[in-house]
Image: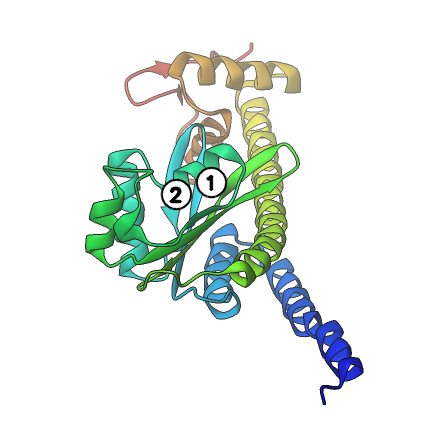
Amino acid sequence: MPNRAQDDADSAAAPVPLATALGDLARQLEQEDDPDAVLDDIVRAATAMIPGASEASISTTSGGKVDSRAASGELPRLVDALQQETRQGPCLDALGEHRTVHVPDMATERRWPHFATRAAALGAGSMLCFQLYVEDDNIGALNLYAGRAHAFDEASEHIGLLFAAHAAIAYAGARKREDLERALDARDLIGQAKGILMERYGLTGQRAFQLLVRLSNESNRRLRDLALDVVRSSSAAEPAGPVTAGRSRDVVVPRRR
């Protein structure tokens, strides 16, 4: 006779390994400072944790452009490239429509006529895609691949949604840390460049910064890149004189008398 109490206990205990695995994943991703390393870890963990997934990749979006990154193998690279070529497919829908997209059988799929037949020929039997997003920020999609049809079920979607939520938070955090480091680096470079110009031309700090901004605008270059050139020229012990604003034009700042 079935032991209902034991069955209930087993059901209650079932989520614990998943919760533990997701917690371990979150801690692992938190230790990564490099966004690319975070993406690589996400892809590896996705194929290990989400039922049915034999391959995975991540599509990221920036400035309206979609890039395929951190592909686990040749199949996702080829299928992602095909989506970019045809401008249609489950990954693009997941990115653009804030939802999960399931392709049970690529060979019979009719939603993307220019994509599905060719994707099936490449070896994609089924796919499952999740949007990666945090509040007010759509940062990409997690794309799962299987060589056979009907590889993904309700458990795949349930676990995948939980996984995608953890992955999105981790990747967004890594990007923010990287942006902060870049901002601090740019601030330090601009400060060094200002000091060099102040010493070289007898300028005030405000005038030195205004000069950098003017050169940046005239040469259509980022302020950080221009500041880096000034610092490098000083490190190379070049004679005081023109400050290079671009490859084709020099701006000469006269010494104050």
Counting labels gives: 2
Give the residue drawn at x 37%, y 58%: 145
Q: Which mark is residue 164?
A: none
Percent x, y of residue 225 = 45, 30
Q: Quadrant of the C terminus?
A: top right
Given residues 190 and 13, the one toward you in this image is 13
**Residue at image coords 77%, 78%:** 9
Q: Amino acid at mark 2?
A: Pro
Question: Horizontally, is 245 left or right of 208 in the view?
Answer: left
Q: Are marks 1 and 2 in contact (CB under 8 Å)?
A: yes
Asked which secondary structure carries label 2, the reply is helix
Q: Judge whether 248 appears above or below 44 on screen.
A: above
Q: Residues within 10 Å of mark 2 (few under 14, many from 20)?
A: many
Q: Is residue 20 above or below residue 32?
A: below
Q: How is the image coloured?
A: rainbow
Q: Identify the residue at image location x=44%, y=25%.
A: 240
For residue 90, the mark is 2
Distance (Cα) linking label 1 and label 2: 6 Å
Please state, as top left, top right, bottom left or bottom right, where the N terminus lies in the image.
bottom right
Q: Which residue is mark 1?
A: 94
Q: Is residue 143 left or right of residue 182?
A: left
Q: Position of residue 147 (x, y in %)?
A: 30, 63
